[in-house]
Amino acid sequence: MEFPDLGKHCSEKTCKQLDFLPLKCDACKQDFCKDHFTCAAHRCPFAFKKDVQVPVCPLCNIPIPVKKGEIPDVVVGDHIDRDCKHPGKNKKKIFTFQCSKEGCKKKEMLQVACDQCHGNFCIQHRHPLDHNCRHESRPSSKAGCSLVRTAESKPSGPLNTLSSSWLAQQFRYQSRWHMCI
């Protein structure tokens, strides 16, 4: 060999090719061959330092300045937590629909409106008989619908086996339920 100090080996672990005109990565300052000199080709851990994109806040659409060496996601997150001027930033109420039943303070995420009186109710008071609805569209007796509101009865007998009378009772229970709605 006439020139033993000429050229350098590629810093990529899978390559190590001797290159007489190596290229230096601007981010990590290592030497690479022509196939691995881009940040993507050698998976440069410092590629974010060379990224010149300006992140934009997703809430207020203001460009956020990022200094060299800072991670853009962290800077945008800090902006949202501290400096963001978006008017709806702090309004994160999920349960906004309050029950209209007198004395009930429950709130729901979705509106549960009564078809008859058009009031907004919680899940517990959503049926007309549960909130004493005064605008019923079809007559229904309170005695018939009282079975609907009671807890489902468990089948009796040894080992809670399903009997035909219990199944018939459940069928009647379901049909009364649909009449009361």
Image: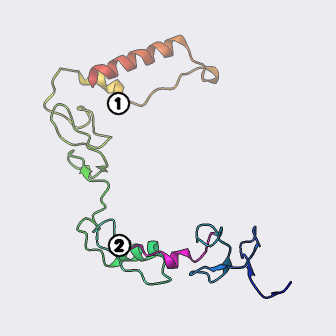
Which one is nearer the viewer's eye here, 92 or 164? Answer: 92
153 w.r.t. 61: above or below: above
Quarter the N terminus occupies: bottom right
In x, y percent, where is residue 166? 50, 16
Q: SS at mark 2?
A: helix
Which is nearer the N-term, disc 1 or disc 2?
A: 2
Q: Which mark's residue is nearer the viewer, 1 or 2?
A: 2
Task: Write the start and end of the magenta stretch as one range.
Answer: 43-54
Q: Disc 1, disc 2: CB below 8 Å? A: no
Task: Tell me what residue is drawn at x 48 percent, y 81 percent.
Answer: 70
Which one is nearer the viewer's eye here, 11 or 146? Answer: 11
**Residue 12 lies in quadrant:** bottom right
Q: Which residue is mark 1?
A: 149
Quarter the C terminus occupies: top left
Give the left or right position of residue 50, taking residue 175 as reference: right
| Main SS category, magenta section | loop
**Residue 121 lies in quadrant:** top left
38 w.r.t. 151: above or below: below
Q: Amino acid at mark 2?
A: Ile
**Residue 16 lies in quadrant:** bottom right
- Give me the C-alpha separation between circle 1 and circle 2: 48 Å
Give the left or right position of residue 94, taking residue 28 as reference: left
Give the left or right position of residue 65, taking residue 17 as reference: left
In x, y percent, where is residue 50? 50, 78
In x, y percent, where is residue 146? 31, 26
Residue lying farthest right? 1
Q: Which residue is mark 2?
A: 80
Q: SS at mark 1?
A: helix
Which one is nearer the viewer's eye here, 104 or 96? Answer: 96
Q: Amino acid at mark 1?
A: Arg
Task: Check residue 53 for magenta coloring.
Answer: yes
